[in-house]
Image (spheres, rainbow, N blue to C red):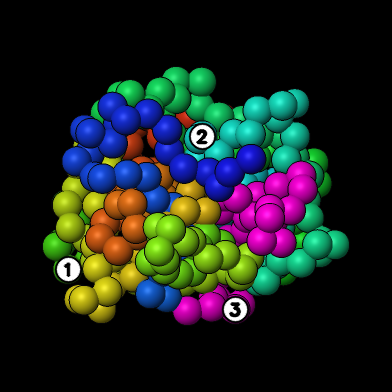
Amino acid sequence: MMRRLVTGFALLASLTVAAPAEAITNGAADGSQHPNVGGLVAPTAYSDGTWLYCSGTLISPTVFLTAAHCDEGGDGRVRVTFSTAYKDGDVTYEGTFHADPLYNDAQSDPHDIAVVVLDKAVKKTITPATLPAADSLSGLSGAQMFTSVGYGAYEVTNQPGGHQYLYNDVRMVATGTLDATNPAWLRISMNPATGNGGTCYGDSGGPNFLGASGTVAAITITGDAVCRSTNVVYRLDTASARSFLKQFVTLN
């Protein structure tokens, strides 16, 4: 079992990034800022004692948004937590994983989107995030900021045996600046040299909020191998993303 990362080198080549990435780096503990951001809980703990393998966002009381490549297979049953720092035994919500059936990471639009339909509604104290209007992200300014949230690796160290990715199951937050807009993607700078932060392994499916708003513009999919350059995220305002999402939630 491994942390979720995008598979298929055809997609990575088309994006001209070195390797998949998905954890919040150069950020800070989120605390209670984004209570609607949660994580997918593994059936058993990893060797470092942590549990979470993907991130996501509550978009209705019973629908949790994440990435299709977060599918663990099996019977499709998963657990979601909204703990700020998950410990075994914390409250989880069970549900069924539904990936876009058109998901194919060899395509320029991979349909890398999924939801977990929860068996019961999440407590009323957690307000679901909103989704962008159709094609509302096409004309964004190059100065547009995004807020990335997730439970992935919080630090990447360079050890004699190679890079090590450190996890603690804490919900983290960082901000980054728009680099480029593509038909299915946004590229967000996470270069710490320019004051940006971003995502890494384990943040797959997590939200990239438009500025400081409660609107999820895109979900984390991939990036560079050591989580220091570019956060590549899947747009939620596209016809393909909205076609999938409208099966589960009401769209504006």
* Residue 215, visible in the rendered structure: no
The image shows residue 93 at horizontal and vertical percentages of 78, 51
The image shows residue 125 at horizontal and vertical percentages of 72, 69
Is residue 64 placed above or below 27 in the rendered structure? above
* Residue 71, visible in the rendered structure: yes
Relative horizontal placement of residue 119, taking residue 3 as reference (left or right): right
| Identity, as a three-letter code, of the amino acid under mark 1 | Ala
Going from the N terminus, do you reach mark 2 or mark 1 first? 2
Cα gap from disc 3 to disc 1, whole angstroms: 26 Å
Residue drawn where x is 71% and y is 47% of the image: 42
Give the magenta range.
28-55
Relative horizontal placement of residue 100, taking residue 143 as reference (left or right): right
Cα gap from disc 2 to disc 1, whole angstroms: 29 Å
Q: Quadrant of residue 13?
A: top left
Q: Which residue is mark 1?
A: 143
Task: Identify the disc placed on residue 68.
Answer: 2
Task: Sort mark 3 into few (<14), some (14-19) or many (20+) by Cα contacts within 10 Å.
Answer: some
| 185 or 157: nearer the viewer | 157
| 41 or 91: nearer the viewer | 41
Asked if the residue at tag 1 contacts the one at tag 3, i.e. Cβ–Cβ closer than 8 Å, the answer is no
Going from the N terminus, do you reach mark 2 or mark 3 first? 3
Task: Point out the residue furthest to the top here.
Answer: 102
| Identity, as a three-letter code, of the amino acid under mark 2 | Ala
Residue 38: say if magenta: yes
Is residue 113 placed above or below 206 in the rendered structure? above
Q: Quadrant of the N terminus?
A: top right
